[in-house]
């Protein structure tokens, strides 16, 4: 059974969204804080784009929640492992 990459991206995005909402900031306001286009914040929160480690670091710093970095990094590592599993060739007996 293959993991559902999209569901994993959406779950990670939901965690990012919650960090932003905890600040009572709109996506545009949070994007301005990061110096990013609002579309990037939207895509990350909706699971339409996979964040980089640098994105996650910037996000937790902008949210003032450095303690969230480890859990988000673990989620990203899990997501990246899904890509690795899919890219491996299948072995046939």
Image (cartoon, grey):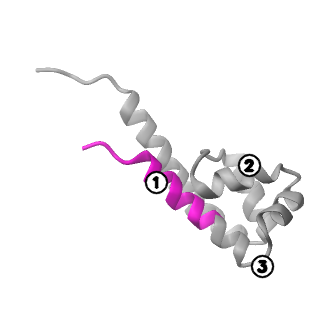
Q: Nearer the viewer, residue 52 or 5?
A: 5
Residue topped by disc 1: 8
The quarter holding residue 67 reads bottom right
Asked if labels 2 and 1 touch by Cβ distance under 8 angstroms, the answer is no
- SS label for mark 2: helix
Q: Dot 3: within a 10 Å radius of its alpha carbon, few (fewer than 14), some, or many (20 or more) residues? A: few
Q: Residue 28, image x and y in percent?
A: 83, 61
Q: Magenta part of the protein: which range?
A: 1-16
Q: Residue at x 44, y 42 (%)?
A: 81
Taking the image as shown, residue 51 lies to the left or right of residue 20, namely left
Contact between marks 3 and 2 (CB within 8 A): the answer is no
Residue 30 placed where, x, y %? 82, 64
The disc, 3 or 2, on the residue closer to the chain's N-terminal end is 3
| Res 29 → quadrant | bottom right
Residue drawn at x 57%, y 52% as measured from the top left: 47
Tell me which residue sits at (74%, 49%) in the image: 40
Which comes sooner in the sequence, label 1 or label 3?
Answer: 1
Q: Earlier in the sequence, mark 1 or mark 2?
A: 1
5 in magenta: yes
| Nearer the observer, 12 or 72 | 12
Q: Which disc, if any, is residue 24?
A: 3
Where 85 sits versus 34, above or below? above
Whether the magenta-drawn stretch holds residue 26 is answered as: no
Say which of 80 and 50 sits in front.
50
Callouts 1 and 3 close, C-beta under 8 Å: no
Give me the disc on residue 40.
2
Quadrant including the C terminus = top left
The percent coordinates of residue 31 (x first, y second) are 82, 58
């Amino acid at each position: 059974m293959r993991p559902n990459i999209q569901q994993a991206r959406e779950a990670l995005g939901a965690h990012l969204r919650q960090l932003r909402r905890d600040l009572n900031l709109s996506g545009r306001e949070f994007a301005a804080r990061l110096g990013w286009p609002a579309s990037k914040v939207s895509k990350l929160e909706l699971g339409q784009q996979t964040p980089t480690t640098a994105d996650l670091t910037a996000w937790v710093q902008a949210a003032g929640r450095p303690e969230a970095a480890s859990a988000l990094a673990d989620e990203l590592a899990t997501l990246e492992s899904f890509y690795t599993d899919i890219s491996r060739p299948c072995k046939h007996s």
